[in-house]
Image (cartoon, helix red, strand yellow):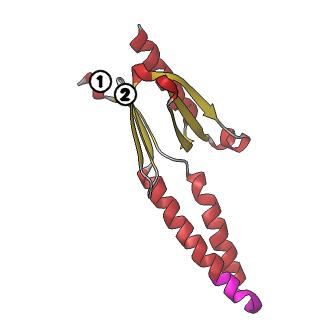
Amino acid sequence: MQDQEILFYGKLHWIIFLWPIVVFILGILLLQQPILINVGYLFTSFGIIWFIVTYVTYYFSSIVVKKSQIILATGILVRQYADIPINKIESVDIRQPIIGSIFNYGSIVIRGTGGTVYGINNLHHPLTCRRIIEQVIHNTAN
């Protein structure tokens, strides 16, 4: 059962909640203006719904790295679940904006043999995840 040991468990970064909260706060501020009260209700409602959808996405999205496989789960309405054997991985790429470097989040793209591409956006600690995956690939090759 050594192959089942979890080496890395990753979730999405809290930054995904930023825009829903900003829209909600903007809606609250618009509610203070009598002439814009309907727009305020619209923004507040949209912010709440967006936050709930984002939370459900956060809750159900993850990446698990084990010695023999990577398990990737994303999405809510269209659930994507991938079980990738370590020996079927060709490359692991990171896409990280400047603000992602500051707050330690980014996207990870895993390319499998045969050109299959798996990815997860806004992952917390993407560089750590890539480093661990590359170590596991290296250890498996030896």
Q: Nearer the viewer, residue 40 or 114?
A: 114
Identified by mark 1, the residue type is Asp
Left or right of 136 on screen, residue 35? right
**Pick the front one: 102 or 67:** 67
The quadrant of the rendering that contains the N terminus is top left
Label 2 Cα crowd, 10 Å radius (few <14 / some 14-19 / many 20+)? many
Q: Vertically, is 131 above or below 47?
A: above
- Percent x, y of residue 137: 45, 18
Q: Quadrant of residue 46?
A: bottom right
Cα gap from disc 1 to disc 2, whole angstroms: 8 Å
Give the image location of residue 42, x and y in percent.
64, 80
Which contiguous range is marked in magenta? 33-41
Q: Is residue 26 left or right of residue 20?
A: right
* Mark 1, residue position: 3
Type of amino acid at the residue the image marks with label 2: Gln
Residue for point 41% across, 7% down: 142
Residue ranking furthest to the left:
1
Q: Is residue 31 visible?
A: no
Q: Determine whether the residue tagged by mark 2 lies in a helix, strand or loop.
A: strand
Mark 1, residues whose alpha carbon is within 10 Å: few (<14), some, or many (≥20)?
few
Q: Is residue 67 above or below residue 57?
A: above
The single residue placed furthest to the front in the displayed view is: 114
Disc nearest the viewer among 1 and 2: 2
List the residue tagged with mark 2: 69
Residue 23 in the figure: left or right of residue 81: right
**Residue 49 x %, y %:** 53, 71
Residue at the spot 55% in from the left edge and 48% down from the top edge: 13
Whether 18 is among the magenta residues is: no
Q: Pointer 1 and pointer 2: residues touching (CB < 8 Å)? A: yes
